[in-house]
Image (tube, coloured by chain):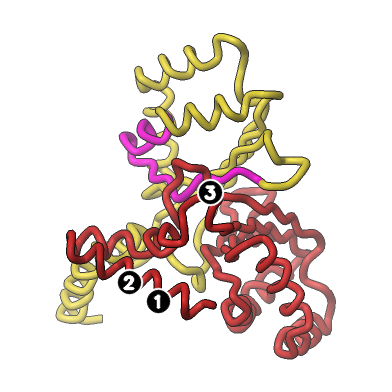
Chain colours: A yellow, B red
Amino acid sequence: MNRREVLQGVGAAMIFSTMSSPASGFEAQSGKSDVVYELRIYHANEGKLDALVARFRDHTDAIFKRHGMQSVAYWTPTDEPLKGRTLIYILRHPSRAEATANWKAFHDDPEWVKVSTASEVNGKLVEKVDSTYMTLTDFSPKV
Amino acid sequence: MLREREAKGEKMNRREMLQGIGAAMMLSTASGLEAQGGGDATGVVYELRIYHTYEGKLEPLLKRFREQETKIFERLGMHGVGYWTPDDEPLKGRTLVYMLRHKSRAAATESWAKFAKDPEWVKLKAESEANGAFVEKHDVTFMTLTDFSPKV
């Protein structure tokens, strides 16, 4: 690829940047994307899912955004045995190194410290978290 | 049905474009879904599927998805949201994670039934797995978006 093609590519990336996902933007800048996705499955303690969902709705998601952790989506399973006790979500991080740094910044965030403490005065909300870091396949739609 | 839905989404986009072109462009997917009523009222369900492959079978599985399987999904109304492979052990190199969006739970059941009988799929599966099955175990989880979730 010559310089002109690169510049054309950058121009196209800028034009498309408002239309497409941040993942495509990263790819255009670096040639190969460092973006990682993190699938997180929270198994809530008995009776704690509503409180957990409320904490994400009211605080956690906003704190994630502040630390560069982009939420792709949040879901709750519709069938037993996960129904009523599980929250599933996917985060997008600019890179794996940034994911590590972002999580540290999140845990140290004063709002998070306050919110998590306040929300668990009557007991922990989450029994277990499964975290899986993943990369989009070359044939995947961008998300 | 699909055409009707797309037409509704397009109509919504046009209305939003009058309010702000930039916002309408960024929200195109979301508004298409919200036009149907938003959240659970739409009946939209998401299906998280995790395929645990046999030793050495992830690459041929990915090839099958890349070249044909995802296209069969789309043809049968199953929309691929994203396809991923895990980066770390013990799942690395032996797992495919993907998510489909269906119009409803009933539509999901119907689409999978059609998929199983689809001539292209039947032929593709038989040919690709002539030397042995690809998937040892698969986990399926049907889900709905939370009320605060971004739309995908």
For the point 65% across and 37% down, the residue is: A86
Asked where in the image residue A66 lies, by quadrant, the reply is: top left
Whether residue B63 is visible, yes or no, is no
- Contact between marks 2 and 1 (CB within 8 A): the answer is yes
For the point 27% across and 65% down, the residue is: B25
Q: Nearer the viewer, residue A62 or B55?
A: A62
Hey, which residue is sitting farthest top in the picture? A121
Q: Earlier in the sequence, mark 2 or mark 3?
A: 2
Write down the region rendered in magenta: A60-77
For the point 83% across and 84% down, the residue is: B130
Q: Which residue is mark 3?
A: B145
Location of residue A64 with respect to B111 vertically, above or below: above
Q: Which residue is mark 2?
A: B11
Q: Do callouts 2 and 1 point to residues on the same chain? A: yes
Name the side, left or right, on which A77 lies relative to A2: right
Cα distance, mark 2 to mark 1? Answer: 6 Å
Location of residue A115 with respect to A17 vertically, above or below: above
Name the side, left or right, on which A45 lies relative to B18: right
Cα distance, mark 3 to mark 1? Answer: 23 Å
- Contact between marks 3 and 1 (CB within 8 A): the answer is no
Whether residue B3 is visible, yes or no, is yes
Q: Which residue is mark 1?
A: B7
Asked where in the image residue A59 lies, by quadrant, the reply is: top left
Q: Do callouts 3 and 1 point to residues on the same chain? A: yes
Q: Nearer the viewer, residue B42 or B30?
A: B42
Q: Nearer the viewer, residue B141 or B131?
A: B141
Residues packed near mark 3 inside 10 Å, few (<14), some (14 to 19) or many (20 plus):
many
Disc 1 sits on a residue from what chain? B
Amino acid under label 1? Answer: Ala
